Image (cartoon, rainbow, N blue to C red):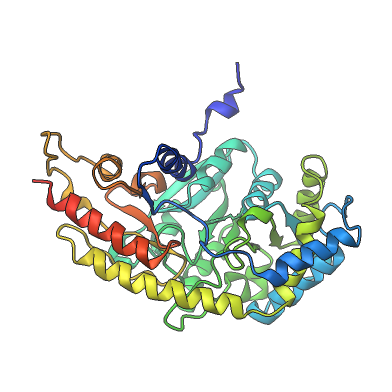
Amino acid sequence: MVSERASRVKPSPTLAMDAKAKEMKARGVDVISFGVGEPDFDTPDNIKEAAIRAMKEGHTKYTPVGGIPQLKDAIAEKLQRDNGLSYRREEIIVSCGAKHSLYNIAQALFNPGDEVIIPAPYWVSYPAQVLLNDAEPVFVETREEEGFVLNPEQLKEAITERTKAVILNYPSNPTGLSYDRSSLEGIAEVLLRSKAYIISDEIYERLLYDGTEHLSIAALSEEVKARTLVVNGLSKSHAMTGWRIGYTAGPEEIIKAMTKIQSQSTSNPTSIAQWAAVEALRGPQDFVRTMVEEFDRRRVFLAEGLNAIDGVRCSVPKGAFYAFPNVSALFGRRRSGGEAVEDSSSLALYLLDEARVALVPGSAFGAEGYIRISYATSMENLRKGLERIKGAIERLS
Ligand SMILES: *Cc1c(COP(=O)(O)O)cnc(C)c1O
């Protein structure tokens, strides 16, 4: 019998959808996947070369648990340069991907009975990690009309004596929203009146369009910074999902607890990947600009294409690489066999069957009525996939 803890969570639905599409592809079915959560670009060569150099120079052994000092310094420089945040080495820990950073935070912070506020739509791993650490997720539903931005009034209502933390993610997976200064200030003001920590997942920081600038909530004031754990990593910004490097910057006491937990679980992240990450942070950044320009083109094309489909409404995402259209107008329409499309997951299954397009239903992100389409795929795939989706939706009656 597995533990009660293990039975509290389901496998990641986004990875499950991706696996299903890959399995169909392996059978020779021509599936277009809009389910993926990783850049379709290759890791830049200068980063790969840094890894090869690290291997040849013998950096193939255990490193300090929380990361090599060179990487901690490169992260501190980055946080200073890009975010105006100043952290010492003792306030930084490198983990095996930002997902692992978030998990370590959950381990270091949550007690049984603690409540953790998660604005919905949310990234699938937040509630799962809260549950795996014996705390309770408390969802606050944001509104499409408000651009899915967390409303401070709603936040205030959700906070109780037991609120241990609030998880923010901006730019957001799945909605593509980003927070401006005044929304962050509204949220911070409410939170400073409580005892809650702010877990700020900024993994999509670099993927912002229309000249939008990223502002970390920790940069609002020293008081806010003292409550915030800034989470970031290289997976999305430098197409390094397989390298597994993420990091957290925050109050020394919590970083210390996370380091202790990491020392008893994974130990250090891969030595070679850490050296590659130093190069990613300190080396030339033109790769990131090129990637963002390409995502930008696809984003506009995709939103336009989706809005041209009857029953689909999509605002242009401000960041990350996902569109999150409202598809609720399609519910109740019937497939040719007679069966009705009732919700986002039956729509996703219909589109997989009928259009051979894989995408993730909004219900996976706590938002029924939507679907998530990743544009981390080629223009050619977007064009073909949109056509197929349009055709399949037009065949509903
Ligand atoms: C991809 C992703 C992460 C985790 O990325 P890692 O590969 O673990 O660094 C964290 N948060 C969000 C919202 C993501 O989409």
Residue occupying image coordinates x 47% and y 78%: 293
Quarter of image, res 4: top right
User: Which residue is the extreme one toward the front?
Assistant: 28
- Residue 173, horizontal then vertical, whole percent: 46, 58
**81 and 372: which is toward the camera:** 372
Quarter of image, res 225: bottom right
Residue occupying image coordinates x 60% and y 15%: 1
- Residue 348, horizontal then vertical, whole percent: 30, 44
From this viewpoint, is residue 85 visible? yes
Q: Quadrant of ligand 1?
A: bottom right
200 relative to 16 in the view: left or right: right
- Residue 373, horizontal then vertical, whole percent: 36, 57
Residue occupying image coordinates x 54% and y 62%: 191
Vertical placement of residue 283 versus 191, above or below: below
User: Which residue is the extreme one toward the top?
Assistant: 1
86 relative to 123 in the view: left or right: right
Quarter of image, res 240: bottom right
Residue occupying image coordinates x 12% and y 34%: 337
- Residue 34, horizontal then vertical, whole percent: 39, 54
User: Which residue is the extreme one toward the left?
Assistant: 397
Vertical placement of residue 225 versus 388, above or below: below
Count up the numbered dots: 0
From this viewpoint, is residue 160 visible? no
